[in-house]
Amino acid sequence: MKIFLDTIDLNEIKKYNEIFDIAGVTTNPNLARRFGMSDDIEMVREIGKVIGKKKEIHVEAFGDNFKEIIKNSERIKKNCSGYNLVFKIPFSEEGVKAAKYLKKNKYSTNLHLIFSVGQAIVSSTINSNYICPLIGRLDDIGHNAIDNLSKIIASYRVHSSKTLVMGSSVRNLNHVIDCYKIGVDAITIPMKVVKEMFNHPLTDAGYLLFKKDLNQMKQISSLNFDKKLVVDANTTLFDTLVILQKQTASAVAISKNNKLAGIFTVGDLNRLIKGRKKFNYNDKIINFATKKPISVDITDKVEDITKLVKKYNLGQFVVLDQQKVLGIVDVKNII
């Protein structure tokens, strides 16, 4: 089933033309006015720049009579040469007559505003490239549009008609699915419904779950941990506090002879200030540190940190490379 975009929003056309294989774009005067196009010539040229010259642009060749339809078709083709144009012509006696003439002169046609099998039969006699039965508008007046479409397709298949059936006036995703099930040759879909085709809550939930599982499988070495948050055991309390403030951090790892000696956190500082014992800011930080802190190795998995968080309810962990202190990893950056 060929899929056409029923829009002239150039940004949307560009986006979805790059995502999947659209057959082209269908247009109408209402869309042109809505998106500020000055005329149909500008509209065709701008769309052509986006989708190229091979994909179809269905453009309205409006007119009250045979001569006006032919005149508009010739005008558009003359000013938009090189593009793969299909001329949309409203079904009527004058419209069918014009489509017949255009077909003989090697124009591609799409007879639209089709609502009955009878109209579809007439359209096939002139071998119009497409007919466009309207789904939503027929549903609006209480008719079964999909059943009507099925009858058109069945009659065309019996007689091996070369005319392609394009579902139009699509209002929702069910219309698209029903058209696909009954074997519609082509369909033109508004952007709201195109986006519905890409979305499903279970797909989104599944993606987030896979992403979470993949993150849990990552090694800690893939995380951003701060290597500046390592101080020597002989560093003063004052200098340590300066580092914490400068890095807007809540903990530093303390190293002695390249091995882990402890950790000092903002929590330790608060307990120190609230305590009754006097302290000197020039004292060594090791005197205020928490000895034997919980640590993780750079080769551990993120899920290992998750387990430690649940077990110890800690916000930071020291990262080691075997015994060497590398830095601090903050749980907020992982979970």
Image (spheres, rainbow, N blue to C red):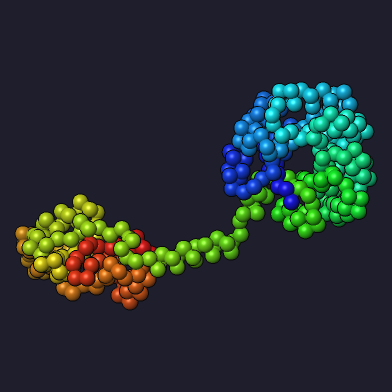
Above or below for 274 versus 4: below
In the image, is 102 to the left or to the right of 189?
right
Which percent across, then down, holds residue 297? 26, 70
- Taking the spot 61% from the left edge, 32% from the top edge, the residue there is 49
Q: Is residue 144 visible?
A: no
Q: Is residue 227 above or below residue 110?
A: below
Residue 323 visible in the displayed image? yes
What residue is shown at x 89% (from left), y 33% (from top)? 100
Drawn side of residue 20 relative to residue 73, left or right? left
- Relative height, residue 264 to residue 37 (above, below): below
Q: Is residue 107 left or right of residue 297?
A: right
Query: In the displayed structure, would residue 282 be above or below residue 163?
Result: below
Q: Position of residue 54 (x, y in %)?
A: 68, 37
Q: Pick whichever, 181 or 286, lies toward us.
A: 181
Instruction: Farthest residue to the bottom: give it.
Output: 311
- Residue 281: quadrant of the picture: bottom left
Label total for image = 0
Q: What percent of the width, then of the height, locates residue 4? A: 70, 44
Quadrant where the C terminus sits is: bottom left
Q: x, y percentage for residue 40?
A: 71, 27
The residue depicted at 81 percent of the width and 38 percent of the height is: 110
Question: Going 23% across and 67% down the picture, which residue do you hit?
Answer: 321
Quadrant of the rendered image containing residue 70: top right
The answer to which quarter of the image holds residue 82 is top right
